[in-house]
Amino acid sequence: MEKFDYTYAYNIALALSRQPRFTGTEGERQARELIVRELESLGYNPSLEKFSVKTYDVVESELEIVKPHNKKIECSVLGFSGETPIEGVEGDILYIENADNILLPEATGWIGLASQRPSREYWKKLIGKASGLVIVEGSPYRELSRVAIPYEWREKMGSLPSVYVRYRDAYELLSAERARLKVVQTYRDTETYNIFATIEGSKYPDEVIYVTAHYDSVQGVPGATDNAGGTAMVLALAKALSASRPKRTVRFALFGAEELGLRGSLFHVNSLSDDEKKKIKTVVNLDVHGGIFGSSAAIISGAKSLRYFVEALAKRVGVNLSISEDVMSSDGSSFVKHGIPAVNLYRASGSGADIHTVKDSSEHLHPIAFKTIGYFTLLLLEEILNAEEIPFEREIPEDIKKKVEEYFSRRQPI
């Protein structure tokens, strides 16, 4: 395990999570500069890929019960959901669960109280009926989510100003008759960057293995495990391999704007030619890392032989790795969409309860959380990079193809 410097990974994660890294902010810029400096110090010549993305700024939000009594409820805006008039909107508050038809009234102008964020289809159904939406956090112990829907929903389907409230506060809303909701947010285009560093293969340079993570966070959140930890893993792997000359090319990629809908990885893969895509044999994606008191897991988006290869390697070295075959809501799926298999590695720990909230902070991080998964990921890469033949098929099974198509179709406007 000595070759993987898990203490280095921990320290990088601490540095990255000192402040939020939301797309288009100063914190994101500083994180990008830190990553570039680290890669340069390791002997790499990093390159930047610029792209434009839509982002949002929350100006003001307010939720208040106005009948039978007056009480303000703390809330958090759902990015890109829409905006109210400056004075807000007032209406009867109705529990609609998950936009169940039986609970939706014929009248319009009410404020919905939902047990979870509606799907794209249900979102469209609520447009023009509800004047606002209040989404209840799924756990009594969770802080307010700081997330967004795809901007296309608002642009193509219309505005539905929405906020999150805490689970326990929602009880008061259940007994309320009317509420007033105020959401003021603005939208803008901004430029951000993907970051790359490459070691060219000595024998099979046209066979490329990507090692990926996203370095952005959601708005106002330190993003320690999601995904300062994954970014730190990539840098630690780059450090471990910096003096090597593997047979295949390895490309380390740190993507921007993942939290806004995998925008950085989608931009990158879409910009590649068909020949360039064919050279990519697999992707090892690292998302949600550093959380102590948990276990290591892998989501395989590829052939059975890829799953068996990962599984056998974990058993050979004695790493308990929970493995499933599915699609992960992360940058690896941008490659799977184009027929490139992905191994998504992550940490399942108690810190998951705080992801996308202000509590996803450095208190969750510990050096030991990087140790075993870091050792295994390095070994996995070395096996793939230096095998005379890649020990699995480069293919996406039909069930995974269907899942990834459904995943991306749910994110787009109707």
Image (cartoon, rainbow, N blue to C red):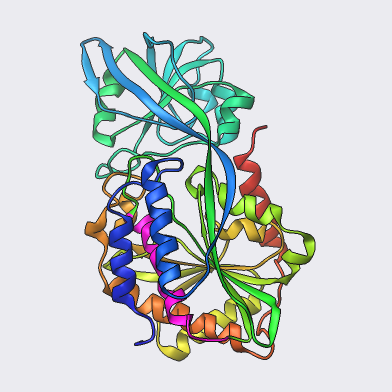
Taking the image as shown, residue 36 lies to the left or right of residue 408, namely left
Farthest residue in the right direction? 275
Please identify the quarter of the rendering in which residue 390 is found: bottom right
Q: Is 25 in front, or is 309? A: 25
Q: Is 152 in front, or is 298? A: 152
Q: Which residue is drawn at 60% across and 88% down?
A: 386
Q: Magenta segment range?
A: 224-245
* The C terminus: image quadrant: top right
**Considering only vertical position in the picture, is 395 above or below 143?**
below
Residue 340 placement (x, y as % from top left): 68, 66
* The N terminus: image quadrant: bottom left
Residue 23 placement (x, y as % from top left): 45, 43
Residue 158 placement (x, y as % from top left): 58, 21
Q: Which residue is drawn at 26% across and 27% down?
A: 74
**Considering only vertical position in the picture, is 96 above or below 302?**
above
- Give the dominant element type of the magenta stretch: helix, strand or loop: helix
Task: Examine the structure image and report whether residue 361 is included in the region drawn in magenta.
Answer: no
Task: Examine the structure image and report whether residue 236 is included in the region drawn in magenta.
Answer: yes
**Considering only vertical position in the picture, is 358 above or below 183?**
below
Please identify the quarter of the rendering in which residue 389 is found: bottom right
Whether residue 234 is visible: no
Taking the image as shown, residue 385 lies to the left or right of residue 9, namely right
